[in-house]
Image: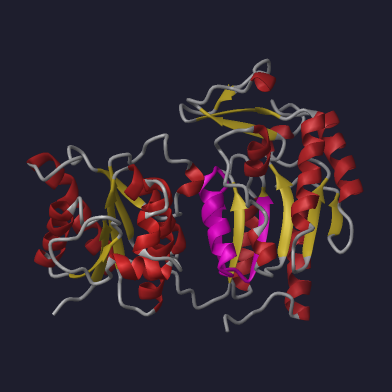
Amino acid sequence: MTDKTILVVGTFDTKDDELHYLVERIQAQGGGVLTMDVSVLGEPSQPCDVNKDQVAKAANSSIAKAAQSGDENSAMQIMARGAVAEATRLQREGKIDGVIILGGTMGTDLALDVCQALPLGFPKYVVSTVSFSPLIPADRLSPDIQMILWAGGLYGLNAVCKSSLSQAAGAVLGASRAVEAPMAERPVVGMTSLGSSCLSYMKLLKPALEHRGFEVAIFHATGMGGMAYENIAAKGGFACVMDFALPELGNLLAGSVVHAGADRMLNAGRAAIPQLIAPGCLDLIDFAGWQEIPDQYADRPFHAHNRLIKSSALNQDERRQTAREIAHRLGQSLTPAHVLLPTRGIEAWDKPGEPAHDPDGLAAFLDEMRHVIQPPIVLTEIDAHINDQTFADAAMQVFDSWVADGTVKVSRT
């Protein structure tokens, strides 16, 4: 008897020994295994539970077409589409409790697609020769992906790579046994913010929302947090969103790697989730500590927040551009969107006497927002700072009206 079943994915023609070592280590710990072969040319030493023909068929193709596609990249993209379809089917049917995928660059490319397609809370582990490499852009990473470097494992088993493989086997099985998947009994409000020294409205809003019977999930808007927020929104996981921290959008437009992907601020609207929006921290631009600053920003003073991130300010033209981008993205929403515009400031460091105080820049942004936010999007100006109680009260007033008229659902059904 086994308590949890792990899907083991890889090219069983070239990595048969390594993949079967993973299988053996999972089974030795009492786990069950299903295997999926995503190879194209060769054959595994023994049949897989999901063979390569099934994978290719799930991509509306065939192994013959993959083999004749012209190159390894196009062939593996066929197999990636099929692997996504088969893995998500097995997960929906409750036949697997976690997935582990082994590969080099080709296998990792496929693995990232599979992991992004599986829901948050489903254990997903990648053993890769390029784990944590700059080859992997942040927007390819699923919110809760786990990775380990396949050290010394390019060709064949050895004591070094067994260390990585055995850790990964134990990690994915342990995660499948320990995980509490997000099955909230109360409707969830998704909220974005930054550290409380900069944005503190969540301290006022969270207890107010919980008092009304909602659960609150707050996402740190520094790239990966925004991606997790967008991932859940895309799957309809929120009753409402309070998207009040938007630096990832400004960073995206500025060319910083500290962004949450090109679909930031789009998924809630596409999923018909009511949106409350405010421009928290949209005056700042963040770059990774290691990132070379683009030429157009090089003459500005930068503050090293820590060794990971450094920040500077957007100028007036750039702030107007972010206002136009907000309007463009909200204009695609399928459900009500309400913008709250705090006219006395949008983060703690823009108050008088603070280093980011820029009244002319704020005025330019507010002016542009007044012009570009048009019905059916609602714009409400608030004579307050974003961290003030007055702002929180205004947000709750809109939220309560949406609950009263049924825009925000109070039941998860």
User: Is 234 included in the stretch rendered in magenta?
Assistant: yes
Where's residue 127, x and y in %?
27, 49
Which corner quadrant holds the N terminus?
Answer: bottom left
Up the image or down, 185 lies above or below 207; here it is: below
Where's residue 87, x and y in %?
37, 68
User: Is 233 included in the stretch rendered in magenta?
Assistant: yes
Where's residue 244, x and y in %?
68, 52
Highlighted range, magenta: 215-244
Side of 136 where 223 appears, left or right: right
Residue nearest the viewer, comparing 125 with 66: 66
Identity of the residue drawn at 22% across and 53% down: 168
Side of 270 where 14 appears, left or right: left
Identity of the residue drawn at 75% across and 29% down: 357
| Residue 52 sits in quarter | bottom left
Q: Disc count in the image?
A: 0
Residue nearest the viewer, comparing 280 with 345: 280
Which corner quadrant holds the C terminus?
Answer: bottom right
Tell me the colour scheme of the image.
secondary structure
Identity of the residue drawn at 77% across and 30% down: 352
